[in-house]
Image: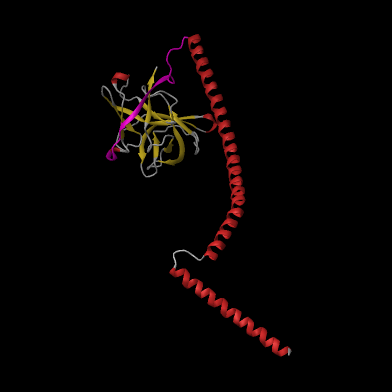
Amino acid sequence: MQKFFSSRKLVIVVVCLIVSFGLMSLSVAIRDKRNTPPLVQQFGNDIVGFADRIVAAPMNGIHHGFVSTKNLLNTYQENARLKSKVDQLTQTQVKDQVLTRENKQLKRQLNVGSTLTGYEKINAAVITRTPSTWASQIIINKGQASGIKKNMPVIAGPGLIGTVAEVNKTNSKVVLISNTAENSNRFAIQVLGDNSKVVNGIITSYDSATNRIVMGNITSKAKLSVGNRVTTSGLGGVIPKGIYVGKVSKVAQDDYGLAKKVYIKPAANLNDIEVVSVAVRD
């Protein structure tokens, strides 16, 4: 009897499997022929979709909450950094204004007229820069009518970019310090070397391969290091003193090994010049 029931259970299991496979095959066949699934399947799909939405809604809310909190913290930290920089900039501007006013008062007290560092700025926009002369010159929208004169220095951003080479009534041509032509932009500059010693020289050339200004005609033997600041010396007669040029990137010997050659990384980005300032000596 027990053996009979055992065989009967096995037969029932096999029949159930066959019926299940048959129903599945029938369902697939009907689904392929119909545009919509059967009613039972639709009901099941709706229940599953509803359950997914119930589970997904709070999970998405939690995820977005974490993301929003993280973005808020990042924004707060960035805002704190920017606020600190703004405060420093404000302090620097106030200090600069105080020193400028004090300098003028001292000049009046000592009856000192114009000095090498005194200059005003005339702002101008770049109106022409062609690909063929990209590294050598630009045209600005200020000329004689605005007080521009030949050989005046031109500044863009933090540093010197060149000098005025040609002046018209309403525009001017500026020769860039990246111009490799002979006798171009050969003006006096100086380096504040180690131990606060000043080393004078002139811009002798431009190394286009490394994007470096080359300073030559150096007579001082004072030690120079990478990172020393370079400014105009004002000794040429036209260019004011103290205009930032760049930083020393390398110190080497000339081709004959008799004098120093200083390679300077320009402070200004010579590939992105849109607005400039022309320095006019007082």
Image-based side of 69 in relation to 36, left or right: right
Residue at x 62%, y 48% (from the top left corner)? 62
Image quarter of residue 186: top left
Residue found 28% across the figure and 25% down from its top: 171
User: Residue 260 appears at what percent x and percent y?
Assistant: 42, 38
Number of numbered discs on residues: 0
Residue 121 occupies which quadrant of the picture? Answer: top left
**Residue 222 within the magenta-colored segment of the rendering:** no
Q: Nearer the viewer, residue 153 or 66?
A: 66
Instruction: Give the extent of the magenta segment.
Output: 111-132
Asked if residue 40 is positioned above or below residue 124 in the image, the reply reads below
| Location of the N terminus (image quadrant) | bottom right
Q: Which residue, as the protein is rendered here, is positioned at the far right?
A: 2
Residue 246, quarter of the rendered image: top left
Q: Please say whether residue 201 is visible from this viewpoint.
A: no
Q: Residue at x 55, y 33 (%)?
A: 82
